[in-house]
Amino acid sequence: MDGHILVIGAMLLDTKGKPSAGLEPGTSNPGAIKSTRGGTARNVAENLARLGADVFLISAIGDDLTGKRLLEQTAASGVNVELVLSVEGQNTGAYIALLDSDGSLAVALDDVTAMEHITPNYLNRNRRLFRDAAMVMIDGSLTPDTMATAIRLADKYKKPICADPSSARLAYKLRQHLSRLHLVVPNQVEAAELLEIDFDNSDPEDTLEMARLLMLKGVATAVLTLPSF
């Protein structure tokens, strides 16, 4: 592939906890807790770099130890992080998931407020990265205006754009842009949100139907992910 891949989105510290003997609300539950580097866009950037791609990441972190470690680890994987903003007084983003004993998600919290510092103006100032890219990838952490700017710049330079909603509650931002996406990779719940339909996870054929519906909305390729538990 000629040219780099431009990835725009969140860098987070991911923390997941799983109870060892059932989940009881209102009290502390014995279990296993694990923290790893995360963020949808950051993960994509690292995986692509480890596969040998030339990758530029645009993101934002806080001026804290977590952000510094994420930046160092991401750079060590081969990702160009020169345009990752370190924002004074800002906390680095985080994702906290509490799982049930079977591994299914009970509840999660995410903090992507640092990404408000990635503005349309910041993307426009760095539009050469869009011009010289082979492909652009965005995640749902972008503000609506910044997302629209990223897609506009990709269109201007005729670059394919790929997207991951990141969460069901962020998926709405992509709805108006579906016809401009080369690839979208939601999970089942995110796909239902993109389509504004109900999904009860009762019939595997529903997942295929949602992929078909996304393509009818104009998405070139829709890949729906399934639960890993």
Image: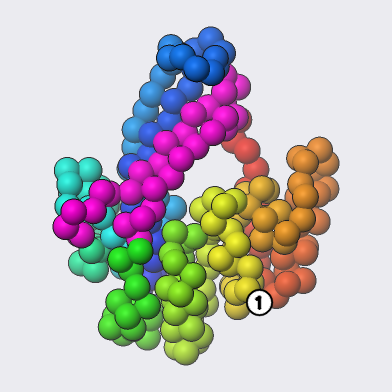
Q: Residue at x 44, y 59 (%)?
A: 141
Where is residue 87 drawn, in percent x and y? 20, 59
Residue at figure coordinates x 54%, y 56% from the top left:
170
What residue would you read off at disc 1?
179
Picture coordinates of residue 105 (x, y %)?
A: 57, 32
Q: Position of residue 24 (x, y in %)?
A: 54, 14
Residue at the spot 53% in from the left edge and 10% down from the top edge: 21
In screen coordinates, is 134 left or right of 74? right
In the image, is residue 199 part of the stretch drawn in magenta? no
Q: Quick check: 125 left or right of 40?
A: left
Q: Nearer the viewer, residue 185 or 168?
A: 168
Residue at image point 46% right, 75% down? 145
Percent x, y for residue 18?
A: 48, 22
Up-down relation of residue 26 to residue 210 (above or below):
above
Reply yes or no: does residue 112 show up in magenta: yes
Q: Is residue 109 above or below residue 144?
A: above
Segment tinted magenta in the rendering: 86-115
Residue type, numbered disc 1? Ser
